[in-house]
Amino acid sequence: MMPGIKLQPTFVEKIWGKDTVPNHPIDKLGKRIGELRFGRPERINDPLLVKYVYTNPRFAFQTHPWDLIVQPHGLASSRTQSWYILDAEPGARVGIGTTRPQDQQSLRSAAQNGVLEHAMDWCAVQAGDFFFIPPGTPHVIGSGISLVGIQHDAGLPDELHVVPCPPPIGSPTVTTSSMPSMHRPLGCTGVLLSDGGFGLRLMHMHSGDLIQITNAGLAWFIPLRGRGDIDGQTWRAGECWLLTQARPAIHAASDADYLFATI
């Protein structure tokens, strides 16, 4: 049995995307890549979705997955997700939650008039910032940002993620702090998330290091920098692997950083 499955990348073109993205030679495609999503070749829907998001400095990208738009599709709630900021242009910002409690009618009106962003709680970001976003929380990824997003894959159609829409009547309005959950730049090792429906760690390895991870369930290996192998299978930065054995051995052929997600 193979120690891991190299998940296949799907490039998603968006008007707010970038012409070139790190680790992937897509500049010859003549497209603006907004997202890079990973999945199994046989199209099995795993419980977590891993994706890179790239926003162009000249455009802004918004996403507001409220319960109102997922419940008609037979789903209990919108996605829990997290963001790890890889790169940010000077002045880049994200918005998570609202600056003050909003009644439902005000949010509906703001969404319909295209001004919901003015109610958002905005925060300047830098590489190494990490955010956890509970289900139902309005959120905006501003321009000039590259990040890794890890979220529960609820099977929502793509178009539902770009339609601003407030929560249904009777559900609470979510407000959040404008500060990142934490700041952990590449080169650090530590837990990013332990109680959000899935676990997430940032790991650093020196060239030549070999570690054996104990994996009790499904696990995702997301190399952000460097190269190496998993029990003989070569990995490189910008990829995503689903680990299928309980104790995979990860070797770093150069200094490396990766995210390790478990569920």
Image (cartoon, rainbow, N blue to C red):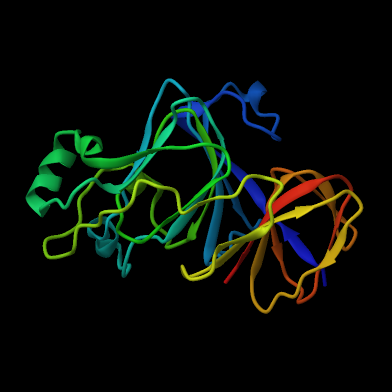
The residue shown at (11%, 61%) is 169
Front position in the image: 73 or 139: 139
Residue 111 on image: x %, y %: 18, 41
Front position in the image: 140 or 191: 191
Residue 141 on image: x %, y %: 41, 39
Residue 186 visible within the image? yes
| Left or right position of 259 against 255 | left
Which residue is farthest left? 105
In which image quadrant can residue 259 be found?
A: bottom right
The residue shown at (46%, 23%) is 57
The residue shown at (48%, 58%) is 151
In which image quadrant can residue 86 be found?
A: top right
| Left or right position of 164 against 189 | left
| Left or right position of 81 against 236 | left
Does residue 182 sit above or below 263 in this rendering? above
Residue 194 on image: x %, y %: 53, 69
Residue 203 on image: x %, y %: 71, 56
